[in-house]
Amino acid sequence: MAAVTLTLIGFFSFIMIRMTTPQLVPLFTDLSVEDSGAIVKDLERQAIAYELKNDGAIVMVPKDKVARLRMKLAESGLPKGGGVGYEIFDKSDALGATSFIQNINHLRALEGELARTIRGLDRVQSARVHLVLPERVLFSRDKAEASASIVLKVRGSLEAQQVRAIRHLVASAVNGMKPERVSVIDETGKLLADGAAQDNAMSSADERKTAF
């Protein structure tokens, strides 16, 4: 009798706790460490219950607060996507910054904005963009061309047309860059586009073999 009573008390206590505990749903997924930390800091400031999953890549919050939190975080520019964009100039002291710092900040902002745009494409989960913009040397006849390297984390696989579109996107955003100077690889190290290949040719080794 005592055992049955304790079991019933425990069962109904568990049911009551489950019913009174708010249901947690994902607020954002595939977050970077920087974005996850900033979002958690904001949630703690608002005293909102949350739960982290997948090593912080997923933030869970009460279901009835998801819409309001997403709008509020969007006003603060979160999530930023793990990179810095042109907002780097919002709080910078332009008068006290040297030309070297300004050039570095402009490069970081351009890389971050391109990465954000590429992440918005279908099948692209994350992206990192590295730009090489040679400095103009006075009285020099030889002119080094700008180049770029892109590392993608994709869902499934990208088609050749999508890879070419990414190359043209980056080349069009950088002054003096040609699409054939943009190399693309995925998270496994597979070469999707050769930075030394001609744009009108097949970009990957498999495509060149098929064309031959």
Image: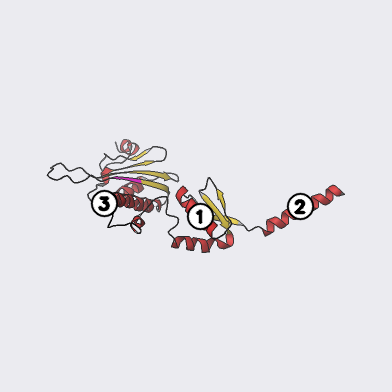
Q: CA distance from mark 3 to mark 1?
A: 33 Å
- Magenta stretch: give its range: 129-133
Q: Is residue 80 magenta?
A: no
Give residue 98's mark: 3
Farthest-out residue, right:
1
**From the viewer's perspective, is 139 left or right of 167?**
left
Tell me if residue 32 can be seen. Answer: no
Disc 3, disc 1: CB below 8 Å? no
Q: Secondary structure at mark 1?
A: helix
Q: Is residue 36 left or right of residue 98?
A: right
Three-letter amino acid code at the position of disc 2: Phe
What residue is shown at x 47% (from left), y 48% (from top)? 33
The residue mark sitting in front, 3 or 1, is 3
Q: Which mark is residue 2?
A: none
Q: Is residue 198 above or below residue 87?
A: above
From the image, state whether disc 1 or disc 2 is nearer to you: 1
Say which amino acid is labelled 1.
Lys
Crowding at mark 2 (Cα within 10 Å: few <14, some 14-19, many 20+): few
Dot 1 or dot 2: first in sequence order is 2
Residue corresponding to mark 2: 11
x, y (%) of residue 158? 39, 45
The one of 38 and 166 positioned closer to us in this rendering? 38
Q: Nearer the viewer, mark 2 or mark 3?
A: 3
Q: Give the CA distance from mark 2 to mark 3.
A: 67 Å
Q: Amino acid at mark 3?
A: Thr
In the picture of the structure, the residue carrying the numbered disc 1 is 41
